[in-house]
Image (cartoon, coloured by chain):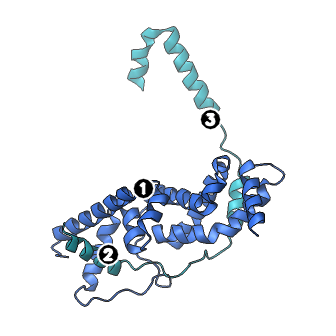
Amino acid sequence: MTEHDETRMKELLQQALPRVQGEPAPRRDLWPAMQKRLEAKPTALPWFDLALAASLVALAALFPASIPVLLYYL
Amino acid sequence: MGDGLSEMMNEFRKGNPATYEAAFEALFRLHQGAVYGWLLRMVRNPAAAEDLTVETFWRIHRAHARFQPARGFEAWARSIATHAALDWMRTARVEIELPAALAGPAIADPAINEEIRRKTALAFGHLPPKLRIAATLAVIEQQTHKEVAEALGISVAAVKLRVFRALRSLRKDLERQGIKP
C-alpha cells in the first residue's frame, strides 16, 4: 500500500465514521453504580469444587494406577 | 487546589480506610467525565461507555496501591480504560455507528456514496480489536500517536504499524467486495 493509498484510506474511514463531537458527558451520575459495585460481596469460594479437586489430586497421588481411569472419565 | 488534589491522590494511593473512600469518590467525580469521553471514542456506544467507566474505576480501585502520583491520574486512568475497552471489544459486538447527537460533522466527498461509507464502517467493525482500537483513536479521533501509545502501553512505532495494518486490511476487505477505494 503506497502513501497515497494510506492517505486515501484514512479519508475514507473519517468519512464513514465521524469522530465524537466535543466533550461528551455520561447521561447520569455513575457514582451510585460505582458504590453498588464497591459494596457487592466478593464471589464466594466454590468450596465443593475445591474439595472435589483436592480429593482427586489425593487419589491420584496415593493410587497412581487410578490416573488413566480418571483421565478416561474427564 | 493543587495541594488538595495531590493530598487526595496520596490518600487514594495509601488506602487508609478512614480516608480512602472519600478520596476515591472525589477522584471518581473529578475524572468520570474524561474517562467516559475517552471510552466513548473507542466503543462508540454511550451505554457501553457508561458501564465501562464503572469497570475502569473498579480496576483503578483494585490497583490503587500501584498508582504512581508522578505519572498523573488521568494518564493512568486512560490506560486502564483502554484495556477495559479492548477486553469489551473482544467479547461484544461493536456498534460502529455513533448516535447522531454525538457524531461530529462528516466531511462530504461527492466521490464517496452512502453505500461505500456503510461498507467501510462494516468492514472496519470486523477488524481485530487491537488494530481497530489503534485506528479508531489515531485516525478517526485524531489523537496523537504518542497519546495512543501511552494509552495502549506500546511504542509509537507499534501504534503506526497497527494503524497501517488496519488500513491495509480494510482496503483488502473493500477490494474483495468490489470497491476500489
Between circles 3 and 1, the one closer to the viewer is: 1
Question: In this rendering, would B102 be left or right of B178?
Answer: right
Residue B118 visible in the shown view: no
Helix, strand or loop at disc 1?
A: helix
Q: Nearer the viewer, residue A63 or B39?
A: B39
Question: In this rendering, would A30 be left or right of B89?
Answer: right
Residue A13's label in the rendered image is 2
Between circles 2 and 1, the one closer to the viewer is: 2
Helix, strand or loop at disc 3?
A: loop
Q: Nearer the viewer, residue B27 or B46?
A: B27
Question: Residue beneath label 3, please?
Answer: A46
Please tell me which of labels 2 and 3 falls first in the chain.
Answer: 2
Q: Are marks 2 and 1 in contact (CB under 8 Å)?
A: no
Q: Are marks 2 and 3 in contact (CB under 8 Å)?
A: no
Q: Disc 3 sits on a residue from what chain?
A: A
Q: Amino acid at mark 3?
A: Pro
Q: Position of residue B50 (x, y in %)?
A: 58, 68
Chain displayed in blue: B
Q: Where the C terminus of chain A falls, by quadrant?
A: top left
Between circles 2 and 3, the one closer to the viewer is: 2
Question: Residue beneath label 1, please?
Answer: B90
Residue at 53%, 73% (x, y): give it: B46
Residue reaching furthest to the right: B18
Q: Position of residue B27 (x, y in %)?
A: 70, 63
CA separation in Å, label 3 and label 1: 27 Å
